[in-house]
Image (cartoon, rainbow, N blue to C red):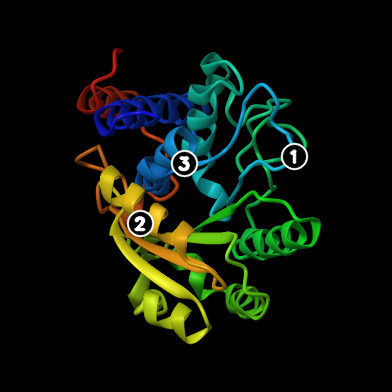
Amino acid sequence: MKTVKELEGIARKVRINALRGIHAAQSGHPGGSFSVTDILVTLYFNVMNVDPSTPDKKGRDRLVLSKGHACPALYATLAEKGYFPPEELLTFRKIESRLQGHPNMELCPGVDMSTGSLGQGFSAAVGMAIASKIDGDSGYVYAILGDGELQEGIIWEAAMSAAKHKLDNLIAIVDWNNLQIDGVVDDVKKVAPIDKKFEAFGWKSIMCDGHDIQGILNALAEAREIQNYPVVIVAKTHKGQGVSFMKDAAGWHGKAPNDEQFEMALKELGGEI
């Protein structure tokens, strides 16, 4: 188990490496990658039962990044965990790379579900949790959703199914940064109150600060104690967390930094040019 300080250091490194990959590709989604980094690092390094040496082992915990465009953070976390060499992150979005612009479970070790079409990853996670129940599998399924993604109707169909089947092995985490490609989430289509909406669909809800690693750990521990209900953790985050000119800026949803911006961001994150 890592200390909170160690996890914070890993998260900083993940942001740096995700930034390097996006800059090398001159394509990608830094804003939503940085908002979800602390959640991913906490899961992979202190919570989930996974082993990079046997990525397909039976009984493991599984993670579905339903907001698949945030894969630079997922790839950098997997690399830091030991699924593949960090140097491979510089092949992001290149032809024949294992690290495509959205996660591909057939190519990248450690990726449990191919995602990208918003809402479908969450539905797959519900199906995986149902299958685990049928198989008597002890592993948890974690699904990370964007708040803008909640505008998809398929999310709520899946939420109803999860409640019907009492999927207490399913924990959803909403990356609530309140920004999407077209601007402020609630200006596009209001999704708040997220916790109450999930509760109305038969879920239990927990709120936390998505950049407070101890708070994330506490929320996940609480979620795993709940029985007979699926649980959603609504994590308040900031798009572009860690880089001042990207933070809370919708324009950095899907834009790569130029060389000058890359050096500025890298310096803020404490990386070397």
Q: Which mark is residue 241?
A: none
Mark with earlier residue (1, 2): 1
Residue at numbered disc 2: 219
Mark with earlier residue (3, 1): 3
| Quadrant location, the C terminus | top left
Quick check: 30 above or below 120?
above
Residue at numbered disc 3: 47
x and y percentages locating residue 73 in the rendered image: 46, 37
Q: CA distance from mark 1 to mark 2?
A: 26 Å
Q: Badge 2: how crowded within 10 Å, few (<14), some, or many (20+)? A: many
x and y percentages locating residue 102 in the rendered image: 62, 44
Mark with earlier residue (2, 3): 3
On the rendered structure, is 14 left or right of 140? left
The quadrant holding residue 110 is top right
Amino acid marked by disc 1: Lys
The quadrant holding residue 120 is bottom right
Can residue 184 be seen in the rendering of this structure?
no
Residue at numbered disc 1: 58
| Quadrant location, the N terminus | top left
Secondary structure found at label 1? loop
Q: CA distance from mark 3 to mark 1?
A: 17 Å
Amino acid marked by disc 2: Ala
Q: How many circles with numbers are drawn on the protein?
A: 3
Q: CA distance from mark 2 to mark 3?
A: 11 Å
